[in-house]
Amino acid sequence: MGRRVAIVGVGLTKCSSHRKDVTYPELIYEAVSGALAQAGLTAKDVGAVVFGSMDPFDGVFAPERWNVEACAGAGLANKPFMKITTGGTTGGSVALGGYYHVASGMFDVVLTVASQRVGESVEAQLVLNTGVDPIYERWMGIGAITLVANQAVNHFHHYGTSEEDLALVAAKNYANALNNPYAHLQRHLTAEDALRTRMISWPLHLSDCCPSSDGACAVVFASEDRARRLAETPAWVLGAGQITDNYWIGERPWYHDWDSLGMLARRVYKQAKISDPLAELDVAELYNAFTINEIIQCEALGFCDKGKGPELIRQGVTAMGGKLPICPSGGVLCSNPIGASGLIRVGEAALQVMDKAEKRQVPGVKTALAHVWGAALGFHVLMILGKNAP
Amino acid sequence: MTQEEEMLIMPGAWNLPFRHTAGRFISRFFRELRDNKKIYGVRCPQCRRVLLPPSSFCEQCFAPCEEWLEVGPQGTLEAFTICYVPFLGLPPPPIVPIMVKLDGADTSLGHLLGEVDLSDPRRARELVKMGMRVEAVWRDERRGEIGDIQYFRPVG
């Protein structure tokens, strides 16, 4: 293990279908200035920047260059600047990059920034289609929605999960998003409403699928001595990691158990000395871009047995006030600036630990989990944050 | 700044042509589709799995593959969805993306299902089933690409 590292500041932007009021750098400036202000830092204090986004959604090659000035003035100040892109896990990889920069001992204060203007993509699924194999698979017209729909069909087949279960997940997340001023979708939705939304790709209704959002997030990672001076309650990194699954989706049964996530969870729980995640975690921010994802994630993360994810949602275990609230922010289901969404999960988990999540705060959070998936179901990132230093 | 203030949008587009290399293995696979209406996989000499699409090496064993075997043309449906909404620039709905495990292969191939009445979504769900048997339907004018299998259809 490297040095102790903590998060000392988080900056979020309002997400929406198209932030027509700001240029790309202005959107980033919103997130970065918020994170620096919360950490009590100025741009000069930033030792290095780790940035992430996926170029084709923004329609700009190397958008990090466009945004260097908004990343704490990294350009004119000649700061070290690294860009990371790993599909949907981009924001999670950016968080890992920031953590590793500080844990290595080479930097004391690192600014991580992740962003996406999916609102500038006229058709996000067409962009996502360029992410599947160009020789064998792209011609079929598949994208994220159809891939996850396949995953859902398999979970239904193996475990008897139903459209009604998915609708409950949607209703819970929409209700949470009403407490989050940064969320894109902010409207009341009952499970009955959800079932009446149109069928997108069987068995996923419209309310089972995330929106396309513009948004950005910035998170400041600091070394132990800086963190203790900067923040009243830093969010300490207790465990973190990434896992990769195979390229060919046809090489395994269809991700209804998401075994790679289960493997990563066991590795990261070991780092964080967690043996019973349902009891020991106080809140989880999961990358639930689709309702079925959240159900399978609960199982892979060990909150329940395989196939029992629907029971957690039916029993209210994962609702606000439940034993383990999931996505008090409304999650990715209610805001998805794709490359930023992973860092938003980390930022939301940090805010919960720092008692700064305002109306969406879960009382008494000591330990929080952030999860990110991406790359056609093939990558995951986890980070566990806590009030007590490791 | 007022809400009525007009916000201007600058148009943009990427139209970048590429050429993706099929290589020796995939070229042979596609030639067999085009010239002989045959589907070939390769067997890993170590784990003995038959890989489809064929690959010059097995990821699991990290070993080179050389042995070619004919698989299919029938197989079993391992995953599917029925997509009902149009997406700009993508094939018009409804489409049924499937994963099919061809007889003799150990891995599944992504493709489309055809010859199923999808007009009534409720009924379509009864017609497309996990584990159902499907078979390849060949395109008349084959070009040496995966689309030479036009689609798979239910057997019988």
Image (cartoon, rainbow, N blue to C red):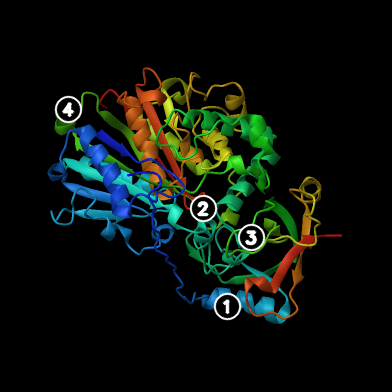
Relative depth, front residue between A170 and B153: A170
Give the Cα separation between the discs numbered 2 and 4: 39 Å
For mark 4, does the 10 Å Cα neighbourhood hold few (<14), some (14 to 19), or many (20 or more) residues?
some
For mark 2, does the 10 Å Cα neighbourhood hold few (<14), some (14 to 19), or many (20 or more) residues?
many
The percent coordinates of residue A338 (x first, y second) are 44, 49
Horizontally, is A110 left or right of A295 in the view?
left
Q: Pinpoint the chain carrying mark 2.
A: A
Q: Amino acid at mark 1?
A: Ser
Q: Amino acid at mark 4?
A: Arg
Give the Cα separation between the discs numbered 1 and 3: 18 Å
For mark 1, does the 10 Å Cα neighbourhood hold few (<14), some (14 to 19), or many (20 or more) residues?
some
Q: Quadrant of the N terminus of chain A?
A: top left
Which residue corresponds to mark 3? B110
Q: Amino acid at mark 3?
A: Gly
Label 3 or label 4, whichever lies nearer to me, is 4
Q: Earlier in the sequence, mark 2 or mark 4?
A: 4
The quarter of the displayed image where residue A120 is located:
bottom left
In this rendering, do the residues under marks 2 and 4 share a single chain? yes
- Point out which mark residue A376 bears: 2
- Point out which mark residue B27 bears: 1
Q: Are marks 2 and 3 in contact (CB under 8 Å)?
A: no
Residue at the image point whose x is 60% and y is 56% from the top:
A250
Give the Cα separation between the discs numbered 1 and 2: 25 Å
In this rendering, do the residues under marks 1 and 2 share a single chain? no
Relative depth, front residue between B55 and A156: A156
Residue at the image point whose x is 65% and y is 33% from the top:
A193
Q: Pinpoint the chain carrying mark 1.
A: B
The percent coordinates of residue A246 (x first, y second) are 50, 54
The percent coordinates of residue B30 (x first, y second) are 62, 76
Give the Cα separation between the discs numbered 3 and 4: 52 Å
In this rendering, do the residues under marks 3 and 4 share a single chain? no
